[in-house]
Image (cartoon, helix red, strand yellow):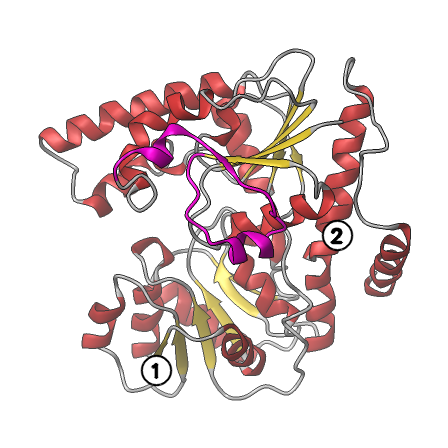
Amino acid sequence: MKVAVVHDWLVDMGGAEKVLKSIMNIYPDADVFSLVCGMSEEKLGSLGIHIPVKTSFIQRLPLGVKKYRTYLPLMPLAIQQLDLSGYDLIISSSYCVAKGVITGPDQLHVSYCHSPVRYAWDLQGQYLKESGIEKGFKSILARWLLNKIRDFDVRSSFAVDKFIANSTFIQRRIEKFYRRDSHVIFPPVDTESFVLQEKKEDYYVTCSRIVPYKKVDLIVNSFRSMPDKKLLVVGDGPGYKKILETLPENVTLVGFVEYEELISYIQNAKAFIYAAEEDFGIVPVEAQACGTPVIGYGKGGLLDTVIDGVTGLHFSKQSTESIVDAVNKFDQCNSLSSAAEISAHAQRFSSDRFEIELRGYINDCISRHPTVCLTSADVGMSNERKSEFDKKVLVVA
């Protein structure tokens, strides 16, 4: 069985790349296709990619790698030019156009959907507002382009044989926009690195890239009205300087930190604050793996990962009043699980679990496909590793 893995672009390391790494753990001999690739051999190696990535013509255009987003109008055409005719199984890891590759009736295409194209669908208004193009000729041009992207997004969904959603929130988006059923498999989280710390210090923490939709400024403003409570903000981004200009005394803007230092900040915090509406949201799960409860916005993927009143608290609105009320409620709450129980809950989102579920689901799809046969080329977690993981799950349960 010849396997191809299709990823939108390989430029930065993020949540989608963690999914790709796990896919490569299952299918280490797969060929990898991407619109562009700007990663070093070392970074690609860390993802389990040890042969050259097959890229589209955008790779060879002027500044094709550095400014790949400017080529959005060409992406549907570029992804369809990739030749996948020689493969039996195609797995796309898609949050833009990767699922749009052309496949035939004798091929099985399983798409792991991080999200339908966010800025072309329900987040179009937010995208235009944050880009400063709500009005004028640029706005008309952007809306026309996004309309074309929506058309392609829907048409390309018809050729996908099976959809996998990364959360129940994305499952609803897939049904809404594509009118397709999907199977939920939560993405892999590095729960092994975020080790349980039962003793907590007297501060709250939030961590994310400082961009508008993450609502870091909202969290900071909430703590402005709670001067007796300490907040650490870990992360960098375009909004860093603006927040720094009016930073209250009880808030510390830490900025970018290395991975080990980030883990330490989260391990020792009394709670993790999260105000974004995410498709899934990996960092809240990492916080829970440390035994740190989460106070988060009760929408999106957070509904799958944080149990309200058990492993954390939900707040209903993205407002300072709602966050302040949730923090004060947290200080008085006695019903939350222990740090060890919160950490055990997070293990249900581990990388091992993801690989077992994904491999099992794809094997089931293969067994039901009329032309693709499961062969000895199918690889994945060893029986010993699976047995060890099953024991961990039993302990957690």
Q: Is residue 217 magenta?
A: no
Q: Which residues are magenta?
A: 35-62
Q: Quadrant of residue 397?
A: bottom right
Return the residue at label 2: 353
Image spot of residue 27 (x, y percent): 71, 40
Dot 2 and dot 1 residues touching (CB under 8 Å) = no
Q: Tell me: residue 99, above or below residue 327.
A: above
Residue for point 35% across, 32% down: 58
Q: Is residue 42 magenta?
A: yes
Residue for point 26% across, 82% down: 248
Q: Quadrant of residue 255?
A: bottom left
Q: Is residue 60 left or right of residue 112?
A: left
Mark drawn on residue 252 = 1
Residue for point 31% across, 63% down: 237
Image spot of residue 307 (x, y percent): 63, 59
Residue reaching furthest top? 105
**Viewer-side residue, 205 vs 82:** 82
Disc 1 crowd rating (10 Å Cα; few below 14, some 14-19, many 20+) is: some
Which of pointers 2 and 1 indicates the residue nearer the eye? 2
Q: Is residue 63 left or right of residue 79?
A: left
Residue for point 22% across, 70% down: 241
The residues tagged by marks 2 and 1 sit, at their Cα atoms, a distance apart of 36 Å
Residue type highlighted by circle 2: Arg
Q: Secondary structure at mark 1?
A: strand
**Viewer-side residue, 146 vs 261:** 261
Residue type highlighted by circle 1: Thr
Q: Tell me: residue 62, above or below residue 153.
A: below
Q: Tell me: residue 265, above or below residue 39.
A: below
